[in-house]
Image (tube, rainbow, N blue to C red):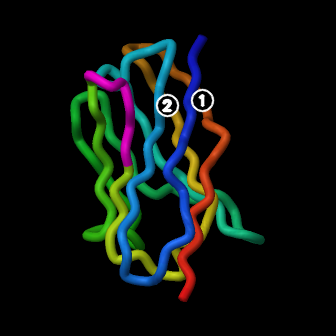
């Protein structure tokens, strides 16, 4: 069974860093296209970062240069390293499986809360 579990959300101050993790089961992350999304209160869910099965990465303009998406094949886990956090980064963060090998998926984790506040 394909499953995603996010963790690592916390309350931090502006300018601080935080790393989110997304533990995967039922598939292998290194053969997958996976993405991070976020949803702030009263707003639609938005794309944050993605990593393709071949390793290419892309980012939303709002996080480019501050966030880094990566994966650890040995731990079968997706990460989102977030630096220089801003209050507008406050949201529930979700990881998503879009594709594993040649098969399309649309699997989501339960989300993890990130709050950036002074």
7 or 96: nearer the viewer: 7
Residue at screen point 60% across, 29% down: 107
Measured as percent of width and height from the top left, residue 44 is found at: 69, 62
Residue at screen point 54% across, 76% down: 116
Q: Circle 1 sits in a helix, a strand or a loop, which is it?
A: strand
The residue labelled by disc 2 is: 98
Q: Circle 2 sits in a helix, a strand or a loop, which is it?
A: strand
Q: Please determine whether, in this image, residue 89 is positioned above or below residue 96.
A: below
Q: Please determine whether, in this image, residue 105 is positioned above or below residue 112.
A: above
The residue labelled by disc 1 is: 106
Measured as percent of width and height from the top left, residue 71 is found at: 30, 36
Measured as percent of width and height from the top left, residue 113 is found at: 62, 58
Give the quadrant of the N terminus: top right
Q: Is residue 110 left or right of residue 61?
A: right
The quadrant in which residue 9 appears is bottom right
64 or 116: nearer the viewer: 116
Q: Which residues are magenta?
A: 74-79
Q: Residues within 10 Å of mark 1 (few under 14, many from 20)?
A: few
Residue at screen point 46% across, 80% down: 86
Residue at screen point 66% across, 68% down: 40
Measured as percent of width and height from the top left, residue 6 is found at: 54, 41
Give the quadrant of the C terminus: bottom right
How many angstroms separate mark 1 from mark 2 (CA)? 5 Å
Disc 1, disc 2: CB below 8 Å?
A: yes
Circle nearer the N terminus (1, 2) = 2
Q: How many marks?
A: 2
Q: Residues within 10 Å of mark 2 (few under 14, many from 20)?
A: some
Q: Residue furthest bottom?
A: 118
Q: Residue furthest left?
A: 55
Q: Is residue 117 covered in magenta? A: no
């Amino acid at each position: 069974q394909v499953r995603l579990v996010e963790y690592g959300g916390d309350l931090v101050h502006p300018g601080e860093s935080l790393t989110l993790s997304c533990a995967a089961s039922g598939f292998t992350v290194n053969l997958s296209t996976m993405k991070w999304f976020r949803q702030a209160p009263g707003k639609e869910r938005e794309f944050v970062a993605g990593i393709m099965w071949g390793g290419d990465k892309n980012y939303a303009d709002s996080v480019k240069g501050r966030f880094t998406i990566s994966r650890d094949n040995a731990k079968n886990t997706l990460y989102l390293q977030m630096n220089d956090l801003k209050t507008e980064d406050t949201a529930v963060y979700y990881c998503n499986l879009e594709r594993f090998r040649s098969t399309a998926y649309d699997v989501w984790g339960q989300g993890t809360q990130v709050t950036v506040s002074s």
